[in-house]
Amino acid sequence: MLLDLSEEHKEHLAFLPRVDGAVVAEFGRIAVESLRRGSNPKIYDGAARKLNVSSDTVQHGVEGLTYLLTESSKLMISELDFQDSVFVLGFSEELNKLLLQLYLDNRKEIRTILNELAPDLPTYHSLEWRLDVQLASRSLRQQIKPAVTFKLHLNHNGDHSTKVLQTDPATLLHLVQQLEQALEEMKTNHCRRVVRNIK
Amino acid sequence: MELSESVQRGFQTLADPGSFDSNAFALLLRAAFQSLLDAQADEAVLDHPDLKHIDPVVLKYCHAAAATYILEAGKHRADKSTLSTFLEDCKFDRERIELFCTEYQNNKNSLESLLESIGRSLPHITDVSWRLEYQIKTNQLHKMYRPAYLVTLNVENTDSQSYPEISFSCNMEQLQDLVGKLKDASKSLERATQL
């Protein structure tokens, strides 16, 4: 699958052959940083002054590179497809190789970042548990009522939340049984076939 | 067990055959247990033809006294000798003591269940549902190809009668971690009960 680059995009990327390899590599680093932490205009100003071009040109160059890397990572295109897509830009052999390297080096991390953008439910982080026995309450004395208390840690969009819950021994066994069945499902022929065939 | 004066006076009245004949006593006793334990019971529990001849104020007073005592006895897990001692102090005759103790014994389990269920506790997990999915793509990320689980815990809040759900997603490792920890808790529970 080839990337479809718009005219505007190609224009922005046209800045890259005008600087040397080290600068392109630096832009690559800035691009991934901006994905992780957001863009910082001051960086563009500094670079613009050093390269003797306008701040906008630098910004477009970096943004163009960012988009190139994220689209490629999102679609998980093969090395060959990446090379062919970049070929239309008419860059030097050396620059093409550099761009490919940037793609391959950063692909995994970019995909991790993109993954966090998906609509999401809280995800499991960890579970703490404690055994309790209730001995008495205001309404009934001399009890022996076992219970398990949990602290469920969840993550949602970077926020950590905890829920304190309780259950009785019978339900605990039921929970274990049900969730073990859930784990077993992945090992069934049906699931194995799906995993093998949908690629 | 600390009992108020009004409870004691109520029982003294119940002991008196002049105020409550044997039949009326038995009916009132049954009505007291019914009001406490029968979810459908209402004020009509005292509307029995054999109780009509008794002053309604006296009837309600004694009914309340009996219900209060029954709850206190249940709360403290009173045994037959405790009950008998109290009833003797209220001048109950042998026959009425026996009747009270028998009725109490018959209703003891329901009474204790009822008392046990009253009270605040943490949200209680009652059930779990799960869903296994195979993630293919999102609009931000294509070619994902990985399994994911969605787990929902059904939870009951004893005081607010609400049933919130807690849902979360997890991958295979995380679910294995969760199941592992639940099994640890379960084994620990087993060991504790064998001590």
Image (tube, helix red, strand yellow):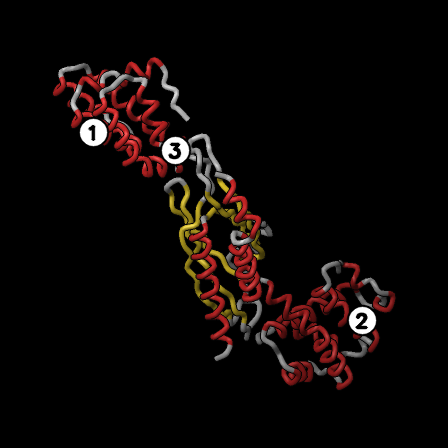
Quarter residue A30 falls in? top left
On screen, residue B158 above or below A137? above
Residues under labels 2 and 1: Cα distance? 94 Å
On screen, residue A41 above or below B18? above
- Chain letter for mark 1: A
Residue located at (76% from left, 80% from top): B99
Answer yes or no: do the residues labelled 2 and 1 have beta carbons within 8 Å? no
Q: Amino acid at mark 3?
A: Met
Residues under labels 3 and 1: Cα distance? 21 Å
Name the residue that disc number 2 marks: B27
Residue B96 in the image: x percent, y percent? 76, 81
Name the residue that disc number 3 marks: A76
* Eye-nearest disc, 2 or 1: 1
Q: Amino acid at mark 1?
A: Ala
Q: Amino acid at mark 2?
A: Leu
Q: Note whether residue A143 is visible.
A: yes
Name the residue that disc number 1 marks: A25
Residue located at (54% from left, 66% from top): A169
Label 2 residue SS: helix
Position of B59 with respect to B7 (left or right) is right
Residues under labels 3 and 2: Cα distance? 81 Å
Label 3 residue SS: loop
